[in-house]
Image (spheres, coloured by chain):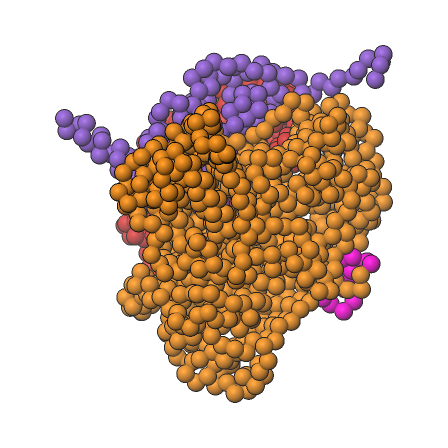
Chain colours: A red, B orange, C purple
Amino acid sequence: MKARAFSYFRARTIDEALAAHAGAGDEARFIAGGQSLVPALALRLQAPTILIDINHVDELRGIRREGDRLRIGALTRHREMLTEPLIAEFAPLLRAAAPFVAHPAIRNRGTLGGSVALADPASEFPAMVLALDAEIEIAGPSGRRIVKADEFFIDLFETALAPGELLVAIRVPLFRSNQRIAFDELARRRGDYALVGCGMIATFDQHRIADIRIALFSVGNLPMRAISTEAALVGSRLDAERIAAAQTALGQDLAPAESDDVPAAMRMHLARVLLGRVLGRLGEAA
Amino acid sequence: MTAPLTSLDRPNSYIGRSVPRPNAKRLLAGRGRYVTDLRLPRMLHAAFLRSPHAHARIISIDVDAARAQPGVHLVASGADLAMICTPWTGTLDHFKGMISEPQLPLPIDRAVWAGQAVVAVVAESRAIAEDALERITVDYEELPAVVDLDAARAPHAPLVNPAASSNICFRTQLDSGGVDEAFAAAAHVVEEEFGFGRHTPVTLEPRAIVADYEPDSGVLTVHHATQTPYQFQDLYSRHYGIPEARVRVIAPDIGGSFGMKLHVYHEDMAVVGLSILLGRPVKYVADRIESFVSDIHARDHHVRARMAVDADGKILAMDVVDVTAIGAFSTYPRTSVVEGNQVIRLIGAPYGFKSYRAALEVVFQNKVQTSQYRAVGHPIACAVTERMVDLAAERVGLDPLVMRANNVIADDAYPAASPTGYKFEALSHEACLRRLRAIMNYDSLRDEQAALRRRGVHRGIGIATFVEITNPSPAFYGVGGARISSQDGATISLTPSGEVRCAISVTEQGQGTEAIVSQIVAEQLGIAQEHVKVLTGDTEVTPHGGATWACRGAGIGGETALQAARQLKANILEIAALILQEQPAALDIVDGQVVSRSTQQPRLAVAEIARISYFRSDTLPPGTQAQLTVSHHFAPQGYPFAFTNGVQGCYLEVDVDTGFIKLLKHYVVEDCGRIINPMLVDEQLRGGVVQGLGAALFEECRYGETGQLLNGSLADYLVPMAMEMPDIVIDHVETPTADTILGAKGCGEAGTAAASACVLNAVNDALTPFGASINAIPITPARVLKALNRY
Amino acid sequence: MSGAPVELDDVDDAVRVRMVVNGRKVACDVAPRDTLVDVLRGPLELTGTHAGCEMGACGACLVQLDGCAVHACLMFAVQADGARIDTIEGLSASGVIADLQAEFHRRNALQCGFCTPGMLMTAHELLSQVARPGREAIRDALSGNFCRCTGYEAIVDSIAAVAEARAAKAAEGSSR
Ligand SMILES: Cc1cc2nc3c(=O)[nH]c(=O)nc-3n(C[C@H](O)[C@H](O)[C@H](O)COP(=O)(O)OP(=O)(O)OC[C@H]3O[C@@H](n4cnc5c(N)ncnc54)[C@H](O)[C@@H]3O)c2cc1C
Ligand code: FES
Ligand code: FES
């Protein structure tokens, strides 16, 4: 398990990184935390000729308020989701998901940007970014652009990022006092990718759900929003009956594929059970 | 019988004490010396190109581009190595009628499992060797692969070995007689079919070897992460035609073994050949991806069982059929049929019924070989037996613990024999069951279970009794023609400064062999433990012996050390007696001092005897030759095996909506005879239990239809991790064997033997209200939900 | 082999890397593809850091990078240029984990010892962040550290005991 030979470039600025990539074309890869990329290189599943290290690009770092959004730099490590007060206050859903992402040492190194750019359908953060209605800030050879999370995830490991583009930051709406979040997942062992996971953020009007966004992961080729399920909940109180209706509605949102160890029907069943539990918790969070 | 050898409160009484392992401090400081750490001058690195197909003819191999790559020193295929290495066959004579094809380090014309090594590259670094692998082209013609067990047995199944008439490797039967009659007369008959998933040992340090052939002197030195260096010395010598005395195998620190590191692996044999071809040291470390497709696997069994009981719940008879698939070859030199053989012989072992019938069928398939892994056969025998006992108890309406108490061989009935003919010297099932009831707080646990069940929380309690085979005599392998020793040897010396050095053939993989040997030697000699140095794992330094397998380290190795130490003590006292003008019998050694036996008064330091003997022999009476080095061998006699026994309990919770299982607590009561170091025994049990729990819930090598391993990485193959494992409560009953002075039996496999059975019973207990049942491990959420009809 | 000029590939051109390893400045030439674990264990001869999976799944390769536990198999050595790396050898020599080592020893929280350096790294980091973690929190922190030998309990016990001892000591210190 040794990677194929490549050369290495340490970028200091976004422009340097972009230029280096542009110079090498398809044969280049950015490396952030490396927690997904390095195993892929070691297994020779990928073999770039040049690795562009973005860990020293300060512009990709930092968490700050920008108007009604929290801007989280791409290089924010998973661990910071657990320790940064701004995250706890303004993006508690990311905080709630973070303990389930891998293990402490991987969280020390893995980055939010890397996780979202990779868009592993079994990953927590891409799905939560979707639930949070985040904006993804992208820098490319032809300038900056912003893509809504709803448009960012396209297919299996495929995103709106074109080759050579950098994910710069994730911008999430600030958490408000009339909102609640809930998150949970079913993983065989602590830190494993889940068999199914679910996170949600709801805005309440008194005891009624005024708005809700629900995202699931490990249920298909990409992180999935449960649109019909959300629709089934808006305008109602979260009682047992509503939760059951939401669980039924989930059938319209998901169509998990067969896999060798988890039959599709089982995954659907688990998704329903989990949805019920997470909604239950959302109710309790009142 | 359970009295300690010496009282614990006198100086140097170490047997029975939880003393920490002296050699562990090094490991804690990161100063272990594993084969993976080794770098020798001019050392090269090997890597292997592996077959992508489960079964394929090798048409041609083009290695020119690889050979031309800078940094590559050798590219070798099957034919190259076949010129210097003789083939091996994994059969033994006492398994009548068994067959297996001859094997070579690398295949010549056919690959028989996906992942089999086909071409070797030796280069300056592992990375360069892997680069070269990408430049080799092998032209394969795919052949039909035999993947699952039933397919292997099907009438017109493709043949794993085209020269054979079927895919059967071995068949055998046991029949005590009277089985049909017993079933006919039974008040109840229960039956079940069981599936056991293939799993693999996953030692944290992968297999590693550095072979160093020195052409000028013709000496081969192999640094090998193995538990059995002498066996490999013999094999390398015979298959490469090098005189035994010129082959040295060194097994330094080893990062886990569990039976996995005592088999012949194709790559390891190849590496020795590569070093011979190059005349340079060659290193090979299996990476984790290679481990999954080339380390032995184990326990791929389907078992059908029936049990007959009378109206009171007395077990009358069992009738079982075990079918197991072992891969494309039987493993060398211990074979791949031992596991199945032990399954059918251990079933029913704790119980006193007489009528037993079993059939075993061992078949080939296109997968990597299975073979001995910790607790060989035991977990399967135990799960089958114990699940049947629970089914019978339920049918009769008895509590599982009561059912067992009513049926185990009574503690006062020994010597006794198992239904399969194993001879038991003395076991303690009844005492163990009583202890278990106490430490589990069984009755209140049942109350708690009932109360929670009413609230929709589904907990289960599982019990499993077991018998474990330890201290094997030559009846195990020797009689079958294997050059695998069941004796051990020790060379023990008093050093000139009065310390002791003991070179012994049992080996250390972290279980504490060196610690217990030093405890035994120190106690027997009456010197402080820190003055005993134990050497293991080097064929050049220690006498030939069986080393470490089948829980023989304490029982056989320990007894060897004990007897050697007693001889050395006698020799020391003889010299002391001459110096002190006393009778040897009037003297003893306490804390490094020769004392008078009657008064315990110190008379002379042992160090002084050493000094006089080594440097002033002129002051000893004429004709005296001090013998301060003793070599001693010990082979078990008497019973062919020292059986141990015990019982485990498990408490768990099943989430009936998700199928997830949470292990809450695990309990073990174990009788391994004399306990030399309670802490080390408990740690063996805990580690063993967790391996069994992994098998019960997580571990399985999953294959696709074409024979590809689907989860061959540490990210996909689920090993038990800290968060999911329970705390484990341990208690002991101590019934020493009278076959040895020491009285120790083994304990290394007891944990693994019954843990999965316990979980199986506990999950089924939890599912009782649903009328659902589980008959296969690992017990995945998918299996639980399926049983509950949830999807 | 004689006469003809030898063609040498240059894909593996060495890069000079400078790091502070266990408190000492080191410089060594590595290929960009060499992982940190391979460089520590190879040219730097720090074989206390182990490799059990080379893909982040076993924890045997944990080291500290600028004070944080990271997997040395999931980083290339070139990336560590300018960084501070502490391995088991360094933590051992400095005495910061002496109490953990002693407790592991006393309770036999290791068998083969292959996982042990990684376990100690995790334990050390946990105790530097949480003063008195419960058993559950300890097991959680260890969730990426595979041990095939011990069954984990003695490791958990040892860490819990050290946490208690350190807390007791701290309380004693502050009450004075
Ligand atoms: C044992 C193990 C268990 C894990 N378990 C989980 C888990 O349970 N849940 C989970 O979500 N993840 C898990 N991970 C993955 C981990 O969270 C990764 O850190 C994460 O998915 C990728 O982040 P990274 O910073 O390491 O990215 P890298 O590995 O550096 O990069 C990943 C990909 O994204 C690209 N990339 C990275 N940053 C950018 C950027 N800013 N702009 C454009 N492209 C970029 C890279 O080129 C690469 O293709 C696990 C990893 C391991 C090794
Ligand atoms: S070797 Fe790095 S985690 Fe296994
Ligand atoms: S002690 Fe062997 S892997 Fe942990």
Locate residue B432, reporting x and y percent.
37, 64
Is B458 in front, or is B521? B521
Is B44 in front, or is B507? B507
Locate residue C69, reporting x and y percent.
43, 30
Q: Let me know if residue B162 is in the magenta part.
A: yes
Q: Say left or right for A257 vs A225.
A: right
Magenta stretch, residue numbers: B150-163
Q: Which residue is most to the bottom?
A: B185
Q: Let me know if residue B500 is in the magenta part.
A: no
Is C89 in front, or is B53? C89
Residue A90, image quadrant: top left
Locate residue B408, reporting x and y percent.
43, 72
Q: Say left or right for B746 vs A285.
A: right
Q: Quadrant of the C terminus of chain C?
A: top left
Q: Is residue B409 visible?
A: yes
Residue B450, image quadrant: bottom left
Q: Residue at x 61, y 68 (%)?
A: B322
Residue C68, image quadrant: top left
Q: Is residue C51 visible?
A: no
Q: Residue at x 54, y 41 (%)?
A: B631
Locate residue C56, reporting x and y percent.
52, 36
Q: Quadrant of the N terminus of chain C?
A: top right
Is B455 in front, or is B714? B714
Q: Is residue B85 above or below residue B129?
A: below
Magenta span dominant secondary structure: loop
Q: Which residue is most to the left?
A: C176
Q: Residue at x 32, y 39 (%)?
A: B595
